[in-house]
Image: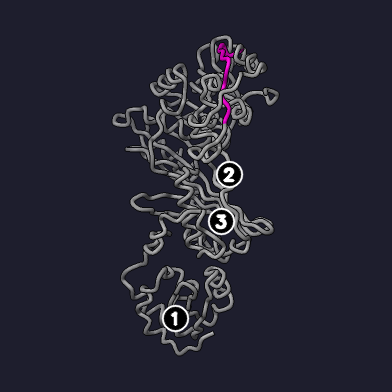
């Protein structure tokens, strides 16, 4: 430990130190970086912060050696007031600061336990963007730190590091997300905004305590790229025709159903893009806003200040809307408000968690909604899953299994061969590239309205719609395999057909 010969009060050039801490962190931790080389970091720190903040900073700057200059609290307070507060400019708060942008070509293959924490995080984020990952999972175990990417809906381990690096990585991410770096017992949520070259990316950060430390999940949202349309989502022509009728209804409820991650919000956004936003007032209430839509009023839910789906829906009804999208119907109050909004002349789009389209009726009934109200407003229910598309460069043709031919006959299709995934460098050796939708659309007509009002059971409604030509998700999945779009293993993984098929 160094003596206090260093004059902190005259350290007005603190911004010139590479990767200097942000002013907010200097104030809270009462520590400021003095110098940094390839092997050492010198930090001036207040006496009262030496134990707690000092321990964190030693970990944060691993593997560099950290030397501390301890100064009296009164001197550090004067430094904050005379130098930090007097500054007219702020450091770049972008997580990839100027000096870090030089590492834009850094890759996961380059990082090692001796790499600086900044470079490790850079490499992780850059590689995730290169691979079009939707999520980054960082989790410590007894001896290793595992980095995983969610690619086309499936998690893949891309790197393992010593578990000893986790405290430094976690602290760096917390600083980047404006979270409490000292809190390790409570879950925390935040956001990171990163800029790489000319592209900006937003990441939602979730941190929860686990046995060996904390689990960190970073999710990309509002990602730049092609805006999804109904055509390129993968709907069949028959379904596209119904969806285009759905956006032209004068009023009523349109639901998208399926598990988390099945693309429900993307489908609703694609529906909104089919509408005439010049002549209609379209408002969305979302949690979070995953993609910004051109010339659409989008509202971000915030539970901390009571901006819930229910409360915002009440306020939005006073905004003279034509179309309202509610990110999710989660409770009875929101369901009642949504259905009554649809009953009073609005188009209401929303999502539910059900296994198929027809189950939306029983789900709403179980939430306490009267059947006559459901029958009055429900127009279309889109149930969907996302399946991975087979890589066209390495797919392998195989004879169609006899058990699958029976399913093909049920779907009214036939092929002597189907394709099997292999794996190559173009698909990151997964055998798949991209995803497509497998869907069924339940259109409510006069007869179905009467069946709902008469409390008919789900099997009775199912028999009616199947006899009238509805294509189920199972039949749609079988067609996708027959056409060489996906594989038998993939639709079995999504439980779209029975696991006994081989």
Mark 2, residue position:
156
Of mark 3 and mark 1, the one earlier in the sequence is 1
Q: Residues under labels 2 and 1: Cα distance?
A: 48 Å
- Out of 213 and 297, give the one closest to the viewer: 213
Residue 165 seen by the camera? yes
Q: Is residue 465 visible?
A: no
Q: Residue at x 44, y 34 (%)?
A: 325
Task: Give the labeled residue for mark 3.
Answer: 188
142 in relation to 22, above or below: above
Residue that label 1 marks: 77
Residue 206 is situated, as x and y percent measured from the top left of the image, at 55, 52
Please tell me whether residue 216 belongs to the stretch shown in magenta: no
Quarter-wise, where is residue 369 in the image?
A: top right
- Residue 416 spot, x, y in % from top left: 58, 15
Answer with mark 3 or mark 2, whichever residue precedes in sequence: 2
Residue count near mark 3 (Cα–Cα under 10 Å), binned few <14, some 14–19, many ≥20: some
In the rendered image, the vertical position of residue 11 relative to residue 269, given as above or below: below
Name the residue furthest top. Answer: 467
At x 49% / y 86%, what residue is drawn?
72
Disc 3/disc 1 C-alpha distance (Å): 29 Å
Q: Nearer the viewer, residue 65 or 294?
A: 65
Examine the rendered structure and indicate whether residue 219 appears above or below residue 459. below
Magenta stretch: give its range.
Answer: 410-421
Q: Which of these two is toward me, 494 or 49?
A: 494
Q: Is residue 366 left or right of residue 151?
A: right
Q: Secondary structure at mark 2?
A: strand
Return the x and y of residue 375 as percentages of the image width and height.
53, 20
Are the residues tagged 3 and 2 within 8 Å (C-beta)? Answer: no
């Amino acid at each position: 430990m160094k003596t206090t010969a260093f004059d902190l009060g005259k350290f007005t050039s603190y911004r010139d130190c590479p990767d200097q801490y942000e002013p907010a962190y200097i104030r809270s931790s009462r520590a400021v970086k003095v110098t940094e080389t390839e092997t050492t970091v010198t930090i001036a720190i207040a006496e009262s912060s030496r134990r707690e903040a000092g321990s964190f900073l030693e970990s944060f700057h691993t593997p560099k050696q950290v030397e501390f200059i301890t100064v009296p609290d009164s001197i550090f307070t004067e430094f904050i007031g005379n130098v930090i507060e007097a500054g007219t400019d702020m450091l770049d708060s972008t997580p990839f600061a100027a000096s870090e942008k030089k590492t834009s070509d850094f890759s996961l293959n380059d990082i090692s336990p001796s790499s600086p924490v900044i470079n490790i995080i850079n490499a992780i984020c850059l590689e995730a963007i290169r691979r079009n990952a939707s999520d980054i999972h960082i989790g410590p175990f007894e001896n290793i730190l595992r980095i995983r990417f969610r690619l086309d809906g499936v998690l893949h381990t891309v790197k393992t590091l010593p578990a000893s690096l986790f405290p430094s990585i976690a602290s760096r991410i917390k600083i980047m997300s404006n979270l409490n770096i000292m809190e390790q017992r409570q879950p925390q949520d935040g956001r990171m905004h990163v800029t790489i070259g000319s592209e900006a990316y937003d990441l939602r950060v979730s941190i929860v305590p686990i046995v060996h430390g904390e689990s960190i999940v970073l999710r990309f949202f509002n990602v730049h790229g092609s805006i999804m349309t109904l055509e390129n989502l993968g709907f069949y022509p028959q379904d596209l025709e119904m969806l285009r009728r759905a956006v032209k209804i004068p009023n009523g409820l349109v639901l998208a159903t399926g598990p988390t991650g099945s693309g429900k919000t993307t489908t609703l956004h694609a529906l909104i893009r089919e509408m005439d936003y010049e002549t209609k007032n379209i408002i969305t209430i979302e949690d979070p806003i995953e993609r910004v839509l051109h010339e659409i009023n989008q509202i971000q839910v915030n539970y901390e200040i009571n901006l819930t789906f229910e409360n915002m829906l009440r306020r939005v009804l006073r905004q003279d809307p034509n179309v309202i999208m509610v990110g999710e119907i989660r409770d009875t109050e929101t369901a009642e408000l949504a259905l009554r909004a649809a009953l009073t002349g609005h188009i209401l789009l929303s999502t539910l968690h059900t296994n198929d389209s027809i189950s939306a009726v029983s789900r709403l009934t179980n939430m306490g909604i009267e059947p006559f109200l459901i029958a009055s407003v429900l127009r279309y229910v889109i149930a969907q899953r996302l399946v991975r598309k087979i890589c066209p460069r390495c797919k392998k043709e195989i004879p169609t299994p006899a058990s699958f031919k029976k399913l093909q006959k049920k779907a009214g299709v036939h092929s002597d061969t189907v394709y099997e995934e292999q794996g190559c460098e173009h698909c990151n050796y997964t055998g798949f590239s991209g995803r497509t939708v497998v869907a069924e659309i339940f259109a409510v007509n006069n007869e179905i309205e009467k069946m709902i009002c008469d409390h008919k059971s789900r099997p009775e409604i199912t028999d009616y719609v199947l006899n009238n030509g509805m294509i189920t998700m199972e039949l749609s999945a079988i067609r996708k395999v027959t056409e060489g779009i996906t594989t038998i293993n993939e639709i079995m993984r999504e439980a779209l057909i029975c696991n006994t098929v081989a």
